[in-house]
Amino acid sequence: MQEKFDPHQKAYVCTHVFDESAPVLLVSRPEGDWCFLCGSMHNDSASEYRTVGIGHLFGRDTTLKDVEDLPADWEAERVKLDGPWLRTKLNSDN
């Protein structure tokens, strides 16, 4: 498989995804940044998030390949790990 990204590119993850206590259920690309989140509510605090190389995420969860082409300013969400992704454009009015 040809990767669509540099595996060392930074990605932001919530602490639940980082410690593997929850799967990625929301992938967001605000302003082009990659964010991999569990879908739960988190405080808007740096202590709730970590930065990792994006290749680690795609390596440990092969279902993320379905969103590796997600454009900037879009998000993809699913209800469960093996569920389908629903893509939506992020609201640019924020």
Image (cartoon, grey):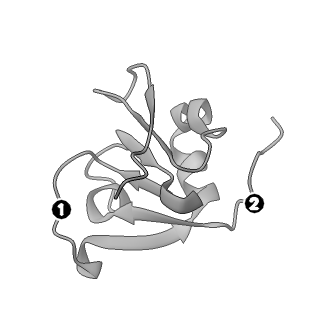
**SS at mark 2 in the image:** loop
**SS at mark 1 in the image:** loop
Q: Are marks 1 and 2 in contact (CB under 8 Å)?
A: no
Q: What residue sits right under mark 2 in the picture? A: 6
Q: What residue sits right under mark 1 in the picture? A: 42
Q: Quadrant of the N terminus?
A: top right
Is residue 33 shown to the viewer in this render? no
Q: What's the amino acid at mark 2?
A: Asp
Residue 52: give x, y in percent of width and height: 52, 69
Location of residue 54 with respect to 86 vertically, above or below: below
- Res 12 → quadrant: bottom left
- The CA span between labels 1 and 2 is 28 Å
Q: Quadrant of the C terminus?
A: bottom left
Disc 1: CA contacts within 10 A as few (<14), some (14-19) or many (>=20):
some
Residue, x 76% and y 46% (percent of image)? 4
Tell which of 13 and 31 is nearer to you: 31
